[in-house]
């Protein structure tokens, strides 16, 4: 997965480069700066002394010394005042400059802390959004695996509004495996017939019924052909129908090129459920089309699974931003979408 949100101590990350949230002196400090200097040892400070400091929004690179990472990229985030002093542009520049340096040094894996979100006071949910936006734009044009490392999960949060909306959606839809097994099995087996024919009960169970995906005048033999097409065939058909390139599709799905070529070359390839869903999100499929694509990979959306309900929440809202979805999955301690 080209962009991952992980909970860890960045000094432990075995990557080509870790990024340090430093100050302009580059002579160490508290927070992640202090942790990195302690773990790297005195050699790091000695090299930093030769750099002559670093301007806010810029980045400089040193060796990793005793760290598992080969390099440390030091960047200086903005001190957050009120959000109207150019803080966002400076924070975006920190990520952009650090990624440019990582690319120059042929790094394949890079780990970022949430820059400026500690001592410098940048609100964590906004800091995370800036990080995800800049990194995902970079990954559309570059091959690299980037980790956003969240140190203290407690402090990590998505926006309160989004969190409570999703929590409410889960409450409304979460089916306890034991008490509602019959309801769930009907839901999953309800015939995909056009709404007009569907019994009231079935429409209830399906919550969202997307008749657009099943117009009565649908060409029957095209439909029959689609029924026995494999996951891989449906994926390639949908990429064509959406007028996307392969690269646009798998990058938007946060899937690496190697996995995509495996799926493309093997007509019977069976992806994992997060991978299948990542492609459904990338193709911006409706809920009915998503369930059809999942079925071809041997899965079904289930209301006794929070991961599935969160995906259904975003599809029902028409929000196909996979990085925002992964942020929400992370906030609810679920695995992330992608490979
Ligand atoms: N691994 C990963 N993330 C960490 C770690 C760690 N070991 N330690 C702290 N963090 C997280 C914090 O939880 C926060 O979300 O890094 C983020 C950035 O916090 P700070 O380290 O306080 O950095 P910042 O807000 O950019 O302030 C920079 O603080 O440490 C000084 O010298 C530094 O003056 C500079 C200022």
Image (spheres, rainbow, N blue to C red):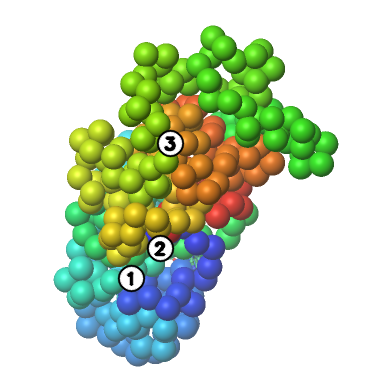
Q: Which mark is residue 147?
A: 2
Give percent across and percent down for residue 326.
47, 48
Horizontal relation, residue 140 to residue 204: left or right: left
Position of the N terminus, as image quadrant, is: bottom left
Q: Residue at x 27, y 80 (%)?
A: 62
Helix, strand or loop at label 1? It is strand
Position of the C terminus, as image quadrant, is: bottom left
Residue 26 falls in which quadrant of the image?
A: bottom left
Give how far apart the Cα atoms at labels 2 and 3 are: 38 Å
Q: Residues within 10 Å of mark 2 (few under 14, many from 20)?
A: many
Helix, strand or loop at label 2? It is strand
| Residue toward you, 140 or 102 | 140
Q: Residues within 10 Å of mark 1 (few under 14, many from 20)?
A: many
Give percent across and percent down for residue 130.
35, 46
Check if mark 1's residue and mark 2's residue have beta carbons within 8 Å: yes
User: Looking at the image, how many numbered discs can be counted on the residues?
Assistant: 3
Q: Residue furthest left?
A: 104
Q: Which mark is residue 109?
A: 1
Asked if residue 253 shows in the view, the reply is: no
Q: Residue at x 30, y 64 (%)?
A: 258
Q: Which marked residue is nearer to the observer: mark 1 or mark 3?
A: 3
Give how far apart the Cα atoms at labels 1 and 3 are: 40 Å
Reply above or below: 141 against 160.
below
Horizontal relation, residue 274 to residue 104: left or right: right
């Amino acid at each position: 997965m080209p962009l991952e949100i992980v909970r860890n101590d960045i000094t432990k990350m075995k990557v080509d480069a870790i990024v340090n949230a430093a100050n302009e002196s580059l002579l160490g400090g508290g927070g992640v700066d202090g942790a990195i200097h302690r773990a790297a040892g005195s050699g790091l400070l000695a090299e930093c002394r030769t750099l002559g400091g670093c301007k806010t929004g810029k980045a400089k690179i040193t060796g990793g010394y005793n760290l598992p990472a080969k390099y440390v990229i030091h960047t200086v985030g903005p001190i957050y005042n009120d959000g109207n002093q150019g803080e966002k542009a400076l924070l975006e520049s920190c990520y952009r400059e650090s990624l440019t340096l990582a690319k120059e040094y042929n790094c394949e894996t890079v780990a970022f802390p949430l820059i400026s979100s500690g001592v410098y006071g940048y609100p964590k949910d906004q800091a995370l959004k800036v990080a995800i936006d800049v990194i995902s734009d970079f990954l559309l044009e570059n091959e690299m695996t980037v980790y956003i490392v969240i140190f203290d999960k407690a402090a990590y949060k998505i926006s309160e509004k989004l969190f409570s909306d999703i929590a409410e959606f889960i409450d409304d839809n979460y089916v306890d495996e034991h008490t509602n097994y019959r309801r769930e099995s009907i839901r999953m087996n309800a015939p995909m017939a056009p709404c007009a024919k569907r019994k009231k009960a079935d429409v209830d169970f399906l919550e969202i019924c997307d008749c657009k995906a099943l117009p009565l005048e649908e060409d029957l033999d095209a439909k029959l052909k689609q029924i026995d097409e494999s996951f891989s065939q449906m994926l390639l058909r949908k990429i064509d129908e959406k007028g996307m390139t392969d690269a646009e599709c798998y990058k938007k799905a946060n899937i690496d090129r190697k996995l995509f070529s495996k799926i493309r070359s093997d007509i019977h390839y069976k992806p994992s459920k997060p991978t299948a869903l990542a492609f459904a999100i990338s193709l911006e499929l409706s809920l009915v089309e998503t369930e059809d694509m999942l079925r071809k990979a041997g899965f079904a959306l289930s209301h006794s699974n929070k991961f599935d309900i969160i995906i259904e929440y975003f599809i029902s809202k028409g929000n196909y931003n996979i990085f925002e979805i992964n942020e929400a999955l992370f906030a609810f301690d679920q695995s992330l979408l992608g490979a």
